[in-house]
Image (tube, rainbow, N blue to C red):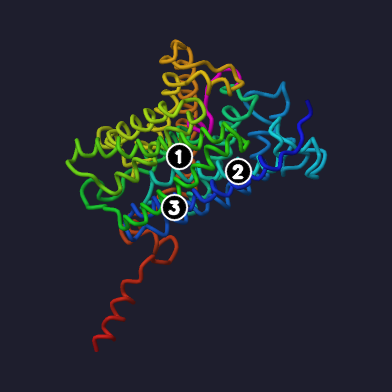
Amino acid sequence: MVATLNTGNTAWVLVSSAMVLLMTPGLAFFYGGMVRAKSVLNMLMMNFICIAVVTVAWVLYGWSVAFGNANDAKGNGFWGTLAQWGMENISSGIASDSHATLYGGSGVPIFAVACFQLMFAIITPALISGAIADRTKFVGWTVYVAAWVTFIYFPVAHWVFSPNGFINADLHVMDFAGGTAVEINSGAGALACALVVGKRIGHRKDPMRPHSVPFVMLGAALLWFGWFGFNAGSALTSGGQASVVFMNTQIAGCTAVFGWLIAEKIQHGTFTTIGAASGAVAGLVAITASAASVSPIGALAVGLIAGFVCCYAVNLKNHFDFDDSLDVVGVHLVGGLLGTLLIGLFAAPGEVAGFTNGARVGLFYGGGFEQLLSQAEGAGIVFAYSFVVSFILAKIVNATVGLRVTADAEIIGVDQTEHAETAYDFGGLASGHTLVRG
């Protein structure tokens, strides 16, 4: 059966693309509120520059490497192609009614899918920025992002998302919207970067409290909104599967809030605003891989477990003595691992039937350990590859253009030393008050 253009699906994918793009500014505010006032602009810029760098790389060769042979039944499982560099030759033409422009059997033009997947590519390296906040050179970070997406994200996206990718087609791993390719991938990169860049001056000695909790909540809200496009948009249709995924995304985000707050109360005796925001993000991270493979009851469990465990996992940096400034490892790496592995327990028969890569139901539905082992294998491969290559790239960039600012620049503040700006003009505010009182 020849696929024809489906305008409803196409509209949903394009709207979802815009929603996912909004997640990067949302992440900037989420992270920006957690850093000190002297670093907030640098954090916003570290996220913002990802939009520009990754878009250019995606057009030049990223799409080709990640999805270039997606419509080829015999395509390479490890690498797409460079034949579609510059997004040339992706079809026989760009007319909306040309069958050759459609992606698989979705009825959605390849260009729409390329837009959607671009937004995934943008936010993934941006997630790493939180691990090295307060101490990073802007030029070094920009070079690192370009290298990271080239050698890590683009090939891993092919392994996981492309119909020909070996993690998808050969290992039968279920990852609907990026639990491995986005969350584990960025979490491993964050751990590697934090180890290379080193600890902040005064780490665990000086107070490094968030400078704007309202920014954190605003960022979390924007992320939550965008996550509906991130997950439900991955269906590439506006039908039943997208509806289930949308609901599961909401459920997991909500139960994770409870999970985190319960763990926080046990550990510290209180419920914090940042804890609620972080819990929601942890649940959304965890459901990313499993949103299309679990029932709503399963989504309840995934979110609750993720919120509870991730709250404890943020303490890993203290136990292993590394400085992950904004808990990227505890939330995104651990949350991504949990969400990917829990599929092996909670994958439900009806939802699994929607996958076409040979995936099986989870242990709790009589499927045995097979799918759990597949999920663990896929997660392990992505983690190992991303950590090792991220570490090497960070070492190279740090030894050449440099990733870390000088000690003096860090103490003064990276906003002033890297961007010659400050987020808040405290001096001007004070002088204004003096004039009024006079």
Q: Secondary structure at mark 3?
A: helix
Along the line of sight, which residue is nearer the eye, 118 or 381?
118
Q: Which label is found at residue 118?
A: 2
Mark 2 surroundings: few (<14), some (14-19) or many (≥20) residues within 10 A: many
8 left or right of 387 in image: right
Residue beneath disc 1: 395
Q: Which residue lies under the disc numbered 3? A: 28
Label 3 CA crowd tier, 10 Å (few <14, some 14–19, many 20+): many
The N terminus, quarter of image: top right
Query: Which amino acid lies under the numbered mark 1 shown in the image of this protein?
Result: Lys
**Residue 317, percent from left and from top:** 29, 37
Q: Which residues are magenta?
A: 169-181
Residue 133 position in % (x across, y down): 37, 49
Question: Which residue is drawn at the image coordinates 77% and 35% (left, top)?
Answer: 4
Residue in the foreground of this view, choosing between 242 and 278: 242
Q: Is residue 68 above or below residue 381?
A: below
